[in-house]
Image: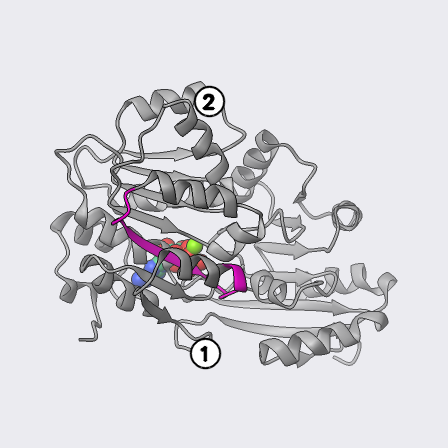
Amino acid sequence: MEFTSFDQMDLSEEVMRALDKMGMKTPTSVQKQAIPLMMDNRCVIAKAPTGTGKTFAFGIPILEYLNMDANFVQALILCPTRELALQICTELRGLGAFIKGLKICGIIGGQKMDKQVQMLKKAPQIVVATPGRLLDHVTRRNIDISQIYTLVLDEADKMLDMGFIKDIRKIMKLTPQDKQIAMFSATMSREVMDITWEYMEGADEIEVAPKEEDMPKIHQYLLHLEEREKMPAFARIMKKYNCHRVMAFCNTKTRVRIVTEGIRKLGFKVDCLHGDIGQGARNRIMEDFRKGKFNILVATDVAARGIDVSDIDTVFNFEVPNENEYYLHRIGRTGRAGREGQAFTFINYSQSIRMDDILHYTKVATEELKLDEE
Ligand code: ADP
Ligand code: MG
């Protein structure tokens, strides 16, 4: 049966109230497919692009199945980055706002261990964690994951890209053999397939094609520019295309620094994220960006992983990304939650071939833009 609204899914009053409060009536495609399967205790392998609502696709069934009388960890959600873990915690706390006694704990690196130990002592039912830090706590016996019902691997492709495979194997061993596993991934890489073969035999597979109705509407513009033309072009586009909340991508840390400085000199409020920035500073920068203290965030691909700021209207690619997939990840920062977005990619002479390759691979619709002829 195909569900067209949350009403038909037989959800608890608490969850329905939270969805209603958030203004969500219609499940996204991945939610329509994953929620009934997960509520039926099936293992699920879901391939879906960014921004399609994966968090609630696993969040809703988990909340529906919690045993509020038990005081052990029942659901464990693994994800690749700290930002993403915190974001999932926030989203799930919103979804569970009306469930009395619900405790969700984030276990992430770069935060004080003892603070996390205090939170774990309060017996959360749900733990959202990055794999490395979770294992630290397991080793120190701060947490018992041997009784969980559900294990979620969110952004599995990125977790595996980031070298978490060994940690994931350990976690598989430390959790019950008959647990429900739900894996979410934007791509089905070789490594992702390996995990599914090893641990998820007989799972149901779901695929949300990028062409479906919940694919974000992003107007993609390509501009052929020399290096020295990029900053003036950026300034003109900012004004002409009403860009308010902006992410700008570069391929390297050095370029991030240079571009950030250039944008600052134009008089915009800007900050940046890259690999050399410590965790404390990263959290502060993300917080300030969310609050609108500055409106342009410049980042490398790695630093931007998993970031979800829902109202980004414009993405700039100061350079063509080195990986085809990165192009989709970058532009996927905009056009979220049914909003429209726009993306501008600056291509210099030597990067044309790279861009052709990306277009061939991603099959997205783009438009060439020449600023001078307008
Ligand atoms: P993904 O994990 O697939 O990238 P998210 O779960 O982060 O996507 O969801 C992207 C955005 O869409 C979030 O801001 C979320 O609150 C919103 N969203 C999720 N489900 C729905 C829905 N059914 N209706 C409207 N908005 C939704
Ligand atoms: Mg997600």
Going by the numbered disc 2, the residue's amino acid type is Met
Tell me the residue that label 2 is attached to: 113
Q: Which residues are magenta?
A: 176-191
Can you say which quadrant of the picture contains the N terminus? bottom left
Where is residue 250 drawn, in percent x and y? 72, 55
Residue 108 placement, left or right of 150: right
Residue 211 numbered tag: 1
Indicate which disc, 2 or 1, sits on the residue closer to the N terminus: 2
Q: Quadrant of residue 105?
A: top left
Q: Position of residue 96 (x, y in %)?
A: 24, 43
Q: Position of residue 78 (x, y in %)?
A: 41, 45
Say whether mark 1 is within 8 Å of ligand 1.
no
Magenta stretch containing residue 178, yes or no?
yes
Q: How dense is the environment of label 1, judged by Cα within 10 Å: few (below 14), some, or many (20 and up)?
A: few
Quarter, ligand 2: bottom left
Query: Is residue 233 visible in the rendered structure shown here?
Result: yes
